């Protein structure tokens, strides 16, 4: 039976085991954003947020499951799988993004404050006020779900392996798309849609014209379709992670 | 308390570490789980605790299957692994975040057991302690959890001689009618004279499972006096006092079980031992 009282103890247990790394990371993110927006006036809050999220999730999600000896301890902790899962979910899907957002925003605001003292310009965490929240939250959910599942799928260096897989997948997909576009382009030219080309420069200019004429939505889907796919994949990854945790064994 | 039926387990397909193990262990005992290196002692303990899942067969602890990892079941058992995790917390903090999971945990006991090992500063970081001292902290926590089932995997590894003496003392204190303590070791001298029962594992199965009284009924441990028939001696080895022997008990002969001799006899005369105990 799920017990909220036990969940409270599991959260406390999980939080205590990662809090040192957490505070160091938050301080680093805050300082990086403070320096970049204050001293160098680089508006990099969004990039630092995503980078911070990737590092934070890699360091904290299922942190105790990566070490063989600690894994035995946490598997035998007297709490249900649902409680252990819920604790990690709260940490990765709520606590980490909120605190990374706060650290980066505070860094930016303080950096801008320093700039204001010198030049009289002031704004409050501009990246948060300009963000497209539905897309941002869906993207964040996708990122968190991948990190969540990857941390349990790969035992050692889970974050590194997860993002390497995501990068490899993205690269393959990119080349697949390019191949499809080139294939379509060739047929387009052969069907009399373009003039013949005799040099590389002509080929590239023809190709550019073709790509610009193509309806992007045809290739990539609309924003809604991408959001729906992301939500479905995220839900699948979260369910998969639960069952993976349930079947997790502490190898000798 | 522990019922194991037709247990099979292997880390690889068609390579069983345990094959067809049947075992029943009752509370109120300290059971020594003995066997050569790599025979499957740790694996069996991890299966008893729910760290690993059986390939076939069942393991039940207090009527529940540990592989389901129900909170109620896990709070009734404590397994101390051989290798200690590196925990970056103070002793005090470690206790505070783990104790709430064990309903019968006693902070007074924990502090007392640590004091037996002369560990008094609970603000020390566990990560900065030596391996042996860290092990003492985890053993003290395991004992203070007051769970009905206590599974200790090679608890004497890394402990010095005085610490082993304290461990034996604590084991005697913790042994009670309602508690089962399973201790695995390949250093049988460390736990001799405290065991109530012995389980010897050999090559995927249980070679011997008997309590000390039954072993005394069946076997005689003593010094050779020349009257014994060489064919009936199951094992012998020279010692300062003379030649130590293990032979079948002729009936009513009093002796103390020497776990090390028993272990050697079990491997030296497997068939005879199995016949004696299966009678």
Image: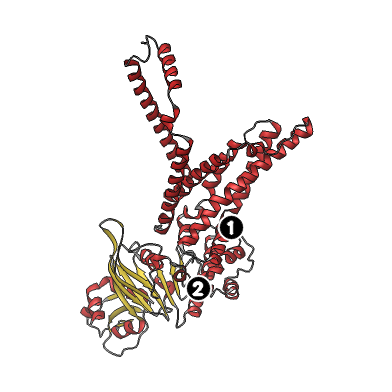
Residue B83 visible (yes or no): no
Q: Which corner quadrant holds the C terminus of chain B? A: bottom left
x and y percent of residue B65 in the render?
A: 38, 69
Name the foreground residue: B109 vs B201.
B109
- The answer to which quarter of the image holds residue A218 is top left
Residue B208 lies, in percent from the top left, at 30, 75
Against A216, is A166 above or below? Answer: below
Q: Distance from label 1 to label 2 (Cα)?
A: 29 Å
Crowding near the residue tagged with mark 1, few <14, some 14–19, many ≥20 C-alpha atoms within 10 Å: some
A192 above or below B185? above
**Residue B97 in sight in this render:** yes
Pointer 2 indicates a residue of which chain?
A: B
Q: Secondary structure at mark 1?
A: helix
Going 62% across and 44% down the picture, which residue do you hit? A101
Task: Please state if B59 lies on the left or on the right of A38 as rendered.
Answer: left
| Callout 1–callout 2 Cβ contact below 8 Å | no
Count the numbered circles shown. Answer: 2
Q: Is A223 placed above or below A57 here?
A: above
Element type where label 2 sits in the image: helix
Q: Percent position (x, y) of residue A210?
A: 42, 19
Badge 2: few (under 14), some or many (20 or more) residues near its Cα, within 10 Å? many
Q: Quick check: A77 left or right of B9?
A: right
The image shows residue B151 at horizontal and vertical percentages of: 43, 70
Above-or-below relation of A63 to A223: below
| Residue identifier under label 1 | A16
Q: Residue furthest top?
A: A198
Q: Nearer the viewer, mark 1 or mark 2?
A: 1
Q: Which residue is more in the foreground, A158 or A115?
A: A115
**Residue that carries the numbered disc 2 in the rendered image:** B167
Q: Is residue B164 left or right of residue B229?
A: right
Chain to which mark 1 belongs: A
Residue B26 disc label: none
């Amino acid at each position: 039976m799920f017990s909220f009282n036990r969940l409270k103890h599991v959260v406390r247990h999980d939080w205590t085991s990662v809090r040192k790394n957490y505070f160091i990371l938050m301080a680093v993110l805050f300082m990086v954003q403070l320096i970049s927006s204050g001293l160098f006036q680089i508006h990099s809050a969004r990039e630092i947020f995503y980078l911070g999220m990737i590092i934070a999730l890699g360091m904290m999600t299922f942190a105790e499951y990566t070490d063989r000896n600690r894994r035995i301890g946490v598997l035998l902790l007297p709490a249900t799988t649902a409680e252990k899962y819920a604790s990690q979910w709260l940490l990765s899907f709520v606590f980490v993004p909120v605190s990374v957002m706060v650290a980066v925003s505070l860094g930016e605001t303080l950096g801008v404050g320093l700039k204001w003292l010198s030049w009289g310009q002031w704004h409050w965490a501009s990246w948060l006020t300009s963000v497209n929240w539905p897309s941002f939250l869906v993207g964040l959910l996708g990122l968190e779900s991948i990190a969540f599942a990857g941390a349990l799928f790969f035992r050692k260096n889970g974050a590194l392996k997860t993002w390497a897989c995501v990068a490899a997948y993205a690269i393959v997909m990119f080349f697949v798309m390019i191949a499809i576009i080139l294939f379509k382009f060739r047929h387009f030219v052969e069907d009399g849609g373009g003039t013949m080309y005799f040099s590389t420069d002509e080929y590239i200019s023809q190709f550019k014209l073709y790509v610009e004429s193509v309806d992007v939505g045809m290739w990539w889907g609309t924003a809604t379709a991408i959001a729906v796919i992301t939500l479905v994949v995220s839900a699948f990854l979260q369910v998969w992670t639960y069952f993976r945790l349930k079947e997790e064994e502490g190898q000798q | 308390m522990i019922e194991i039926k037709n247990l099979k387990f292997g880390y690889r397909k068609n390579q069983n570490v345990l094959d067809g193990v049947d075992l029943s262990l009752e509370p109120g005992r300290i059971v020594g789980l003995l066997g050569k290196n790599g025979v499957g002692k740790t694996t069996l303990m991890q299966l008893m605790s729910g760290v690993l899942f059986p390939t076939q067969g069942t393991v039940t602890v207090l009527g529940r299957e540990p592989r389901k990892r129900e909170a109620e079941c896990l709070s009734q058992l404590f397994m101390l692994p051989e290798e200690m995790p590196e925990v970056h917390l103070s002793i005090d903090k470690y206790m505070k975040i783990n104790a709430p999971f064990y309903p019968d945990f006693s902070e007074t006991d924990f502090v007392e057991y640590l004091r037996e090992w002369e560990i008094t500063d609970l603000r020390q970081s566990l990560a900065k302690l030596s391996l042996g001292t860290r092990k003492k902290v985890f053993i003290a926590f395991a004992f203070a959890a007051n769970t009905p089932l206590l599974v200790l995997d090679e608890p004497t590894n890394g402990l010095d001689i005085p610490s082993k003496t304290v461990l034996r003392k604590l084991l005697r204190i913790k042994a009670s009618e309602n508690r089962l303590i399973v201790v695995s070791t390949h250093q049988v001298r460390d736990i001799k004279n405290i065991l109530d029962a012995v389980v010897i594992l050999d090559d995927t199965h249980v070679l011997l499972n008997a309590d000390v009284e039954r072993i005394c009924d069946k076997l005689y441990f003593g010094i050779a006096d020349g009257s014994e028939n060489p064919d009936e001696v199951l094992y012998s080895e020279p010692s300062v006092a003379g030649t130590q022997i293990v032979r079948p008990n002729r009936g009513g002969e009093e002796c103390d079980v020497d776990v090390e001799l028993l272990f050697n006899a079990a491997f030296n005369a497997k068939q005879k031992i199995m016949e004696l105990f299966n009678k």
